[in-house]
Image: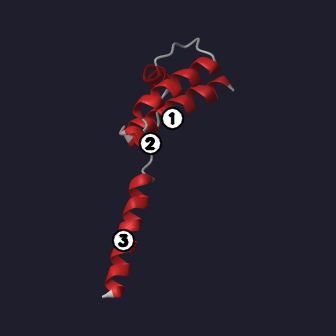
Amino acid sequence: MAKLLFIGLALFGLWLYLRRSAPTPPIDEKEARAILGVDNRADADAIRAAHRRLVAAVHPDRGGSVELARRINAARDVLLKRRD
């Protein structure tokens, strides 16, 4: 019985890991600007401010969507890499 319980817990843990590590599809710069609501002249500070504002509203710890938070983070990363 203990062996069966251990296997069940291991499979559940694996399922949780795979579910959390699902890759976010790549986004282009135009889509990233639309997600964050910034224009193409936005500097790094404006990008970070828009990111903070949106993540605060949709963060999973506040009942928001994990996928939406991932998309917002990906948008920030795309736009900040462009600035570097």
* Residue at the (41%, 66%) spot, across then down: 14
Count of numbered marks: 3
Please identify the quarter of the rendering in which residue 9 is found: bottom left
Which residue sits at x=48%, y=28%? 28
Of the numbered discs in the image, which one, if any, rests on residue 24?
Answer: 2
**Quick one: label 1, few (<14), some, or many (20+) residues within 10 Å?**
some
Q: Is residue 29 left or right of residue 58?
A: right
**Quarter holding the C terminus?**
top right
Q: Earlier in the sequence, mark 1 or mark 2?
A: 2
SS for tag 2? loop
Identity, as a three-letter code, of the amino acid under mark 3: Leu
Query: Crowding near pointer 3: few (<14 within 10 Å), some, many (20+)?
Result: few
Judged by depth in the image, the label closer to the viewer, 2 or 3, is 3
Q: Label 1, on which residue? A: 73
Residue at 40% in and 33% down:
58
Q: Is residue 62 above or below residue 80?
A: below
As drawn, the residue found furthest toward the right would be 84
Q: Are marks 1 and 2 in contact (CB under 8 Å)?
A: yes
* Amino acid type assigned to the residue bearing label 2 in the image: Thr
Among the 4 quarters of the image, the one containing residue 1: bottom left
Q: Could you tell which of marks 3 and 1 lies nearer the N-terminus?
A: 3
* Mark carried by residue 11: 3
Amino acid type, label 1: Asn
In this view, 39 is above or below 72:
above
